[in-house]
Image (cartoon, rainbow, N blue to C red):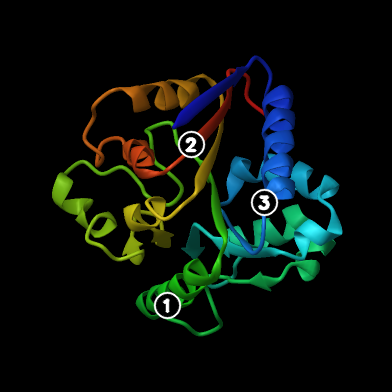
């Protein structure tokens, strides 16, 4: 099931997505695995955590959808997650970051997948909050020119490390999307709205990775024409 919520302003979209996330988490039962990306997808997460009850926060295990592999960590998504959630991060039931000091990318991906699979087995509910790029990229699953360059996102591994033109990334893959109870997607700006609208088309996933959202049980999309 997919629902699209459209707003004129980024402020309205952020507020609506935050309200929705709060309701979904407050209404949930048992242990919840909440997987987060970085960038603008954290805007509604930041607002939601300001309002979440302590009892709900104490049931949340926070993990990552994707990460940049950088030595200084200035742009790392985990740092962005820490800043977005603030002090409530320490009150969560558990934290699962993709990187540990000294890990090589491939080793980090393997270790993270093992821990993620263990959490998936014990979670009563699994929610992922994603961003969509202007080219239809989904979290850390980036679009490629050739289909063979996209196969590592589809080969059954749940977490992979790979090299881009700019840096090394670690990301969850299509295999995770099928395990989610819900994917909440946030996108703003005309180009990203068009990328979201293209999900309805039958496009090759290597050209438009957001097509993979069709594998999730439930998808809620919050978009605004206005840039944040």
Camera-nearest residue between 78 and 23: 23
The mark closer to the camera, 2 or 3, is 3
10 Å neighbourhood of mark 3: few (<14), some, or many (≥20)?
Answer: some
The mark closer to the camera, 2 or 1, is 2
CA gap between label 1 and label 3 equals: 25 Å
Q: Residue at x 84, y 63 (%)?
A: 87
Camera-nearest residue between 172 and 94: 94
Camera-nearest residue between 132 and 55: 55
Q: Is residue 76 visible?
A: no
Q: Where is residue 76 shown, x and y percent of the image?
A: 58, 61
Question: Which of marks 3 and 2 precedes in the sequence?
Answer: 3
Question: Which of marks 1 and 2 precedes in the sequence?
Answer: 1
Q: Residue at x 70, y 29 (%)?
A: 16
Q: SS of the residue at dot 2?
A: strand
Q: Which residue carries the number 3 mark?
A: 28
Tell whether label 3 touches label 2 (CB within 8 Å): no
The correct choice, above or below, for 134 with respect to 67 in the image is above
Q: Where is residue 11 shown, x and y percent of the image?
A: 74, 26
Q: Where is residue 22 shown, x and y percent of the image?
A: 74, 43
CA gap between label 2 and label 1 equals: 25 Å
Q: Which residue carries the number 2 mark?
A: 219
């Amino acid at each position: 099931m997919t629902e699209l919520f459209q707003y004129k302003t980024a402020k309205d979209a952020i507020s609506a997505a935050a309200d929705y996330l709060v309701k979904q988490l407050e209404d949930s039962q048992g242990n919840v695995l909440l997987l987060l990306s970085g960038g603008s997808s954290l805007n509604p997460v930041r607002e939601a955590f300001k309002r979440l009850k302590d009892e709900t926060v104490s049931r949340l295990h926070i993990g990552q959808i994707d990460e940049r592999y950088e030595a200084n960590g200035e742009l790392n998504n985990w740092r962005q997650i820490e800043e977005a959630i603030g002090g409530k991060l320490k009150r969560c039931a558990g934290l699962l970051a993709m990187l540990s000091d000294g890990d090589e990318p491939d080793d980090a991906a393997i270790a993270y997948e093992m821990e993620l699979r263990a959490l998936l087995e014990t979670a009563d509910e699994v929610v992922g909050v994603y961003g969509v790029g202007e080219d239809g990229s989904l979290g850390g699953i980036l679009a490629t020119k050739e289909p063979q360059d996209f196969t590592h996102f589809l080969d059954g591994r749940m977490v992979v490390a790979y090299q881009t033109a700019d840096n090394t990334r670690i990301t969850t893959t299509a295999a995770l999307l099928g395990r989610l109870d819900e994917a909440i997607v946030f996108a703003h700006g005309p180009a990203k709205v068009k990328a979201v609208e293209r999900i309805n088309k039958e496009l090759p996933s290597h050209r438009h990775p957001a097509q993979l959202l069709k594998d999730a049980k439930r998808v809620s999309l919050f978009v605004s024409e206005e840039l944040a």
